[in-house]
Amino acid sequence: MISGRQALAQIEQTIEKARQQEAQCELAYTRTTEEVGRLRIQRTEAFRDLARLKLDAIRQDQVVGQLDAAERQALNVLNSRQEALRQLTERRRQAEEQVRQADARRQAAVDTLEQALGQVEALRRDVEAKISADPQWIAARAKVAEITGQAQQAEKKAVQAEADRDEKRRPYEADPLFMYLWQRKFGTAAYRASPLTRTMDRLVARVVGYDKARANYALLNEIPEKLREHARRIIDDLRTVRDRLTALERQALVAAGIPPLEEKAARNKEAVDDAERGLTEARAALGELDRSHDASVLEGDAPYREAIALLAAADEREDLNQLYEEALRTPTPQDEAIVRRIQATDVMINRALRQAVDAHRQLKETAQRRAMIEQEWEELRSQGYDTPYGTFGNEAALGNVLGGVLTGAIGGAILGQVLRGGFHHGPSPWDSGFGGGIPFPQPGGFGTGGSFGGDGGFRTGGSF
């Protein structure tokens, strides 16, 4: 069994491994794309040599000049791309380091807060054990229990009366003549009508037996309202006696010296909140660079394609094709050597292109797996799964699933199921309502997703 924080730390380690894999895939992709560009330039140089050998001086200067211009332009594009990617990769590496440092600061702040909370909780347990023998506290506690029982019974009766009202008034509300008289407030001081209308309404009232039905219908509506009001009064009484009990407990805590410990914990909590904000900012900056990286490398790499297109257009011109075909038809030893260079280079270009495509696919899949794990990590953390007061009982399955996700053998949905299925909310210092509970909320991302305060508020499903 491991704590929630340990489980999320394990996920963070997996994210770090995924980023390392991603960096390796990116390096392989960069090298293969650079190799394709280098081979394209090598092929262009071979055509340049062939042009010098086969063409007359005028045509030679023209063709070689065009090849040289295309090569220079492509090299400029490739160099610019390489430098831009290097800068982006370096900024991304720095952002990853910023996230690691921010997370370390947060973990240190959380550790300090836990220690402070432990001191608060230890003193509170000690005071609670001692005051439980105090007659005044026993009487106050008994009074709370007594009125709590009364409130529960009052709520139960009010709910039952409301259900009976809804059931028993249906026949009345289904009678259009009765409802006509009821809505006009016939038989009450609020009834207003002309003499003729009064006469007709009295006739209708005698036909439907309105006087008796009105009394019954009014009683049906009145009883639940009275019972609900009675329940509210008891709840007010319960709040009062609970406040007295809490004040008594708080007085004992103060006498035992808890305020300095609470103030220390509150300062530590503020430090955790500050660290949380720093981590959030660092992760946002890294996320922005991740998106820039994906747009540059995974979803386009337009500068690379532009450079290759320039070289391809240069060495696929019609006069070069004619030159190549002529060299094949009438080979000389020099022609043949250059042609073999071109053919060998074509084979290497095709091989390098396949490697580049494969490296790009691996890079994209690794980046997607990393993003998926990060999404699960962020979602679970936002739901409070990183609390030290929660545990995971399926740590072996979690480790296996994370390893499978890292290799691509297991999808993200399985990871989410394992994480949510293995988590158990344990007790935390915020769960106790003794003395009013801890006087500040849990830090962000540090909760358990529940409601806290213990005896701080009575709820039975009603509107109070």
Image (spheres, rainbow, N blue to C red):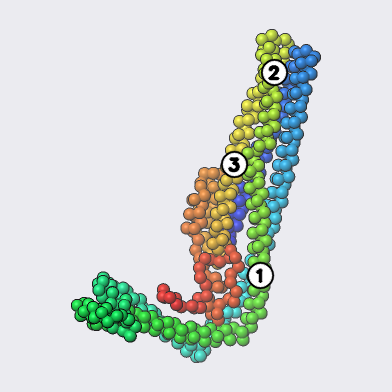
**Which residue is drawn at the image coordinates 51% and 70% (left, top)?**
451
Q: Is residue 106 above or below residue 334?
A: below
- Name the element at disc 3: helix
What residue is drawn where x is 30% and y is 80%? 193
**Which image quarter: residue 121?**
bottom right
Quarter-of-image position of residue 117: bottom right
Going by the numbered disc 2, the residue's amino acid type is Leu
Image coords of residue 209 (percent x, y): 21, 79
At label 3, which amino acid type do we have?
Lys
Query: Of label 3 and label 2, which has the lower sequence position?
Result: 2
Name the N-terminal-most of marks 1 and 2.
1
Describe the element under mark 2 as helix, strand or loop: helix
Which of the two residues, 65 or 134, is positioned nearer the viewer here? 65
Q: Could you tell me which quadrant the C terminus lies in?
A: bottom left
Q: Is residue 388 left or right of residue 320?
A: left
Q: Marks 1 and 2, how far apart in space?
A: 72 Å
- Residue 119, can we see it? yes
Q: Earlier in the sequence, mark 1 or mark 3?
A: 1
Q: Which residue is mark 2?
A: 320
Residue 229 pos. (x, y %): 40, 82
Instruction: Residue at 70%, 45% (x, y): give it.
Output: 89
Q: Which residue is mark 1?
A: 270
Q: Position of residue 103 (x, y in %)?
A: 66, 59
User: Which residue carries the number 3 mark?
Assistant: 364
Q: Is residue 442 above or below residue 318?
A: below
